[in-house]
Image (cartoon, rainbow, N blue to C red):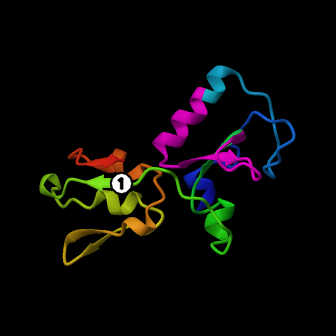
Amino acid sequence: MGASRSRMDVCLIFNPELSTGTERRPASKHDALETVAEADAKGLISRPFRNLEHPDELDGGICFCCPECCYYFRHPEEHCDKGSLCESTLAGSCTGCLLCVESCHFGARRAADGRLVVDRDKCYGCGLCVGACPAGCIEMK
């Protein structure tokens, strides 16, 4: 299913010393913007590469992950830092369509008795639920 969800070369690498396991090729600004648009359209998770010695610093790249190919999804025992943001759902505005449940790769959103249940401890702050909500009742805080 990975090939139908995303092509494997959707990482943008700015540091020539980094390795992603896929073949590299130069990208123009236009190519990079198209990659970002494709990642958005396919619901991929934007994950910046972090400096291992200084986790608050970026380290030269952005990977657009999907559950079928991302190392952290395929190896859940590996540590993956959560983002600094967390979802905030305005429950009174929620229509109960549950489209946000389908967009959440981390299991932070689920349906129970036809209603939305949110487990904020599982939220990684990726923001995919925001774009999936037609009612616009989800924000990242």
Asked whether, in this view, residue 105 is left or right of residue 72, the answer is left
Residue 24 in picture, x, y percent from top left? 81, 39
Coordinates of residue 115 in the picture (x, y in percent): 20, 70
Asked if 2 appears above or below 37 in the picture, the reply is below
> From what the image shows, is residue 89 above or below residue 48?
below
Q: Is residue 84 left or right of residue 60?
A: left
Percent coordinates x, y for residue 2 in the rendering: 61, 59
Residue 52 in the figure: left or right of residue 135: right
Q: Give the secondary structure at mark 1.
A: strand
The kind of residue tagged 1 is Glu
Q: Based on the picture, tell me whether residue 101 belongs to the magenta stretch.
A: no
Residue depicted at 77% across the width and 52% down the height: 53
**Which quarter of the rendering shows the N terminus?**
bottom right
Residue lying farthest to the left in this orientation? 92
Give the residue at the far bottom of this rendering: 113
Q: Quadrant of residue 96?
A: bottom left
Tell me the magenta residue range: 33-59
Give whichever of 68, 88 is nearer the camera: 88
Instruction: Please determine whether, in this image, residue 87 is positioned above or below residue 108.
Output: above
